[in-house]
Image: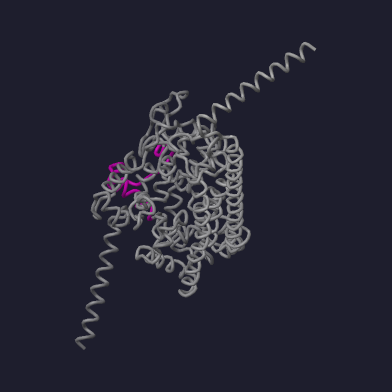
Amino acid sequence: MPKFSAILRRRFLVGLLMLFSALTASLAPGRAEAPDETYKALGVSKGATPKELYEALEKRYHDEAQGAGKGSLAKYWEPIPISKYLNPHSFYKPPQTIDVDASRAQCVECHQQTSPGWTHSWQRSVHGNLDQIRNLPESDSRAYKKAMIKEVEANLQSMGKLKAGETLKEVGCIDCHMGVGQDHGQHKTELKMPDAAACGQCHVQQFAERESERDTFTWPQDQWKPGHPSHALSYKANVENAIWAAMEQREVAEGCTFCHTPQTTCNSCHTRHEFSAVEARKPQACAQCHNGVDHNEFEGYMLSKHGTVYQARGDQWDWNARLADALDNGHMNAPTCQFCHMEYEGKFTHNMVRKARWAFMPMPKIADNLNHPWFTARKESWVSTCSNCHSDSFARAYLDGMDKGVVSGLEITEKSRSVLVKLYNDKLLPGQKTNRPAPPAPEKDDAGAFFQLFWQKGNSPSAVEYEFAEMWEHHQIKHYRALAHMNPGGYTYSEGWSQLVKSAAKINDEDTRLREAAEIRTELKRIAGEKRGDLEFDSPQQRLIAAGLGAIAVLLGGAFLLRRKRQ
């Protein structure tokens, strides 16, 4: 009996603790659930108010020393007109053609005429009709947004933008483009394009989660710099790229930036002005950036069994259900990009790198350390995610096979790398000694480097280097991505492994051709040197005799020509 009483007491205490936690959460709905690492990095306690947390996040977010602005290569490039939309905090300036102090209502009235697409999207959004959400029955799959509105109101009350107990009437043009809660503003001086920090004023939790990618991604063997590669530092990765900064063709370079904007804005995933959660939950929302030759996740997913089920059955799913309820209430029977990458140990977050292991691309420093606790812990998190639908044994079997397949692709690439680097070091590449201009600063020459996919002059790059650049930056990454997304054709035959074999064959053929040509040139020089040796004179006497004979030959030749002329 005493033992039974102890069990009851423990259960009572656990229940009391759970009740206390629930009450605490209800009293502070705006408190973001960011990882401990983020609070530590910001120097903020976990008991911080939304205002304190947001101000710390915003300060770091706009700090040029921590990833904002033009970066360390700023002197090599200048923004072009489109740049102000890709990094609005750094480059946007309001148009000087409209000089008006506009009210909330006037913003909508004017833009209904000048840009009706914007206003129509906004009117369909949650921002445009908060009361519609407030009046939803609890049975509606969107009803969870009622709590989100209360959370936003608590955030704004903490920041002094709403009075205590005051509700948010709407989120209009002026709140995002001039300032939350403003009644009017000067179009010529106060207008701005909102960045992620502007969205973060209301959505502190989501902003904190996204920013936590900087803090939870610290590679144990320094494979990448802390926080890379991630959405939170995607723009910094762009501007710190040497060839991006070096390119004269800025319009082409900004093509890279169009995909490196999740750091600078939220509308990469939540298209303005509707900011639809339904849209952001679908694989197509990721497709604009996660496609193509070096990050073909979308193609890999769509051609997998997961993608097949999505395409065949996705129209029957309830996309209004939040991801946490997608399996139970949303009728989802296959994962999306968002479900797999936003899920972390049973919870869903805007931090999408907490399980990342291979990250953007395979490299030996990752392959050689997969048994390190940092990597094995992240693999266990993937097993947990896969186990939402699969058995533990299936998840482990596939993840283990994926790792071995990626290592195989990496091995063939690295063998080709050693072949190319030796050609470069031996100065045997075509035109290397005669017609190899240096790349533009701050880029530096290298064999089969990334810049050679984007810059060409003379024999730089040579064809074999371009082949290798495609090999490591296209085929190897496709091989890995297809393995990770369960697209067998993408890693075995139509892409991936088959293409790696083709590139390796071409590189080895070119290595043989160039080395045989170099041997032939060496032999020709040797033979030519031997023939010249028959006429060489080593002593001063031999050289004097040769000079005398040459003079006699000249005199005889001159006499012969003079005689012929007289005749």
Residue name at image x 36 percent, y 65 percent: 372
The residue at the far top in this view is: 566
Residue at x 53%, y 65% (from the top left corner):
334
Instruction: Identify the image quadrant of residue 193.
Output: top left
Mark yes or no: residue 468 visible.
Answer: yes
Between 372 and 36, the one lying in front of the other is 372
x, y (%) of residue 66? 33, 43
The answer to which of 65 and 509 lies nearer the viewer is: 509
Residue 166 in the magenta stretch? The answer is yes
Residue furthest bottom in the image: 1
The residue nearer to you, when weighing 43 against 197, is 43
Quarter of the image with the C terminus is: top right
Q: Is residue 285 visible?
A: no
Q: Which residues are magenta?
A: 147-176
Report x, y in % for residue 273. 49, 42
In magenta stretch: residue 126: no
Q: Is residue 127 left or right of residue 202?
A: right
Q: Tell me what residue is drawn at x 59 percent, y 37 percent.
A: 532
Q: Looking at the picture, how far across and down is residue 182, in whole percent?
A: 36, 35
Please indicate whether residue 448 sits to the left or right of residue 232 in the image.
right
Q: How many marks?
A: 0
Closer to us: 12 or 310: 310
Quadrant of the image containing the N terminus:
bottom left
x then y, percent, for residue 98: 46, 24
Q: Residue furthest left?
A: 2
